[in-house]
Amino acid sequence: MSDPIAWSDFPELTEDHITIELDRGWVPAGYIQLQLVLGRKVSWGKELFAWDVSGRYLESCRVFDRDRGPRGFTVKTSQLGEIQLAKALPLDGGPVAFYALTDFAGKDGARITFIWNRD
């Protein structure tokens, strides 16, 4: 189960340290580009998922030991309902959503890079 969070909660989240780089005007109006990067001190895989306003899967990307990113994708701002930041757990290795963002006001046309520095 993911914890709903706000943009102001970054970088110090419940269990992790994730910084955000917000570059406005990077993509055309009507779109948001999302990227994920694995910091130097983090070894477990991380994923970024995008869901539409109806809760349907849109896109995702993954970074891990050998491919630290950036990895990402671009989605229509009007379709974006939620993004989830997930991490693999040591016992089963599958992704578990830890954080969910649903407010994208003021993010249209931006490239948003999540840099997972500590877990």
Image (spheres, rainbow, N blue to C red):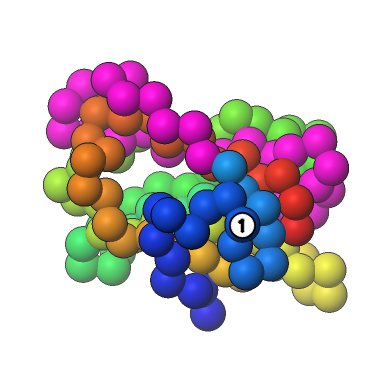
Front one among 93 and 111: 111
Residue at the (75%, 51%) spot, across then down: 118
Decide if residue 62 is on the left or right side of residue 38. left
Instruction: Assign the C terminus to one quadrant of the image.
Output: bottom right
Q: What stretch of residues is rendered in magenta?
A: 20-47
In the image, residue 89 above or below residue 58: below
Observer able to see residue 118: yes
- At label 1, the amino acid type is Glu
- Image coordinates for residue 1, horizontal then vertical, percent: 53, 79
Q: Mark 1 packing: few (<14 Cα in 10 Å), some, or many (20+)?
A: few
Observer able to see residue 47: no
Name the residue that disc number 1 marks: 12
In the image, residue 37 above or below residue 81: above
Decide if residue 22 is on the left or right side of residue 67. left
- Image coordinates for residue 106, horizontal then vertical, percent: 22, 40
Secondary structure at badge 1 equals loop
Residue at the (84%, 75%) spot, across then down: 91
Decide whether residue 9 is among the magenta residues: no
- Image coordinates for residue 5, horizontal then vertical, percent: 44, 66
In the image, residue 77 above or below residue 22: below
- Image coordinates for residue 115, horizontal then vertical, percent: 61, 40
Residue at the (21%, 62%) spot, across then down: 53
Residue at the (74%, 38%) spot, across then down: 39
Q: Residue furthest bottom?
A: 1
In the image, residue 34 above or below residue 54: above
Decide if residue 25 is on the left or right side of residue 59. left
Q: Quadrant of residue 117?
A: top right
